Image: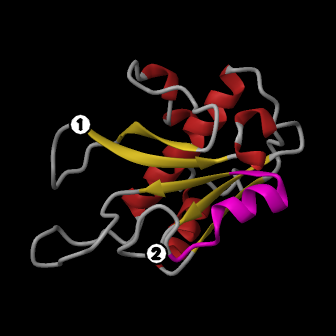
Amino acid sequence: ILISMSIFNIKAAAHTPALPDSDGQVEIPAQEWPYAPGPRTIKVFIHYPGHALSGVGPQTGLMLDLHNWGGFHAIGAPDPRQLADRYNLVTICVDYLQSGPHNPENVPPYDLGYFQALDALRALRYVSASLDARGLPYAHGRIYAAGGSGGGNVALMVNKLAPRTF
């Protein structure tokens, strides 16, 4: 399956926030989930080289840094601050669908990472489109995904769904 990043048209959503000027978090619109119909958002944590958007330059890459199953932000994943500064990356952590503690008796079943991967791709598209819209250059050929445990599964899924992106 090939998914074009253009399906994640962030500009179409009027309530999409601007990129923060320094390390921070935003909530962006996400795809509706059949088990809980209606609007849904995902929390995206953004870490810049040097802690500021002004640290992004032509050699800066983008990296999805995805938490473990049952986690949030960067729990169980590589430290996003270390990645941002050491490797000149904007690291993007995503509280994708079903992040946080999981109780199988109270929530629908895990979908093996499809919705989680779509949430991660949506967050990546949000950051890349926002940088492009602001005219901020970054290294389009340096886009990575990594994660710990369940986040590793989601990293594999984003590569399966958008193989030409990474």
In percent of width and height, residue 124 lies at 59, 45
Depth check, front residue: 80 or 116:
80
Mark 1 secondary-structure assignment: loop
Which marked residue is nearer to the observer: mark 2 or mark 1? 2
Name the residue furthest left: 105
| Callout count | 2
In percent of width and height, residue 157 lies at 52, 66
For residue 39, the mark is 1
Point 58% across, 31% down: residue? 19
Q: Which residue type carries mark 2? A: Asn
Q: Is residue 137 above or below residue 109?
A: above
Q: Is residue 134 above or below residue 145?
A: above
Q: Is residue 89 left or right of residue 126?
A: right
Q: Is residue 161 above or below residue 130?
A: below
Dot 1, how many residues are within 10 Å of its Cα: few (below 14), some (14-19), or many (20+)? Answer: few
Label 2–label 1 contact, CB within 8 A:
no
Q: Which residue is mark 2?
A: 68
Which quadrant of the view contains residue 105?
Answer: bottom left
In percent of width and height, residue 6 lies at 57, 33
Point 18% across, 38% down: residue? 38
Name the residue furthest right: 59
Mark 2 secondary-structure assignment: loop
Q: Which residues are magenta?
A: 76-90
Q: Which residue type carries mark 1? A: Pro
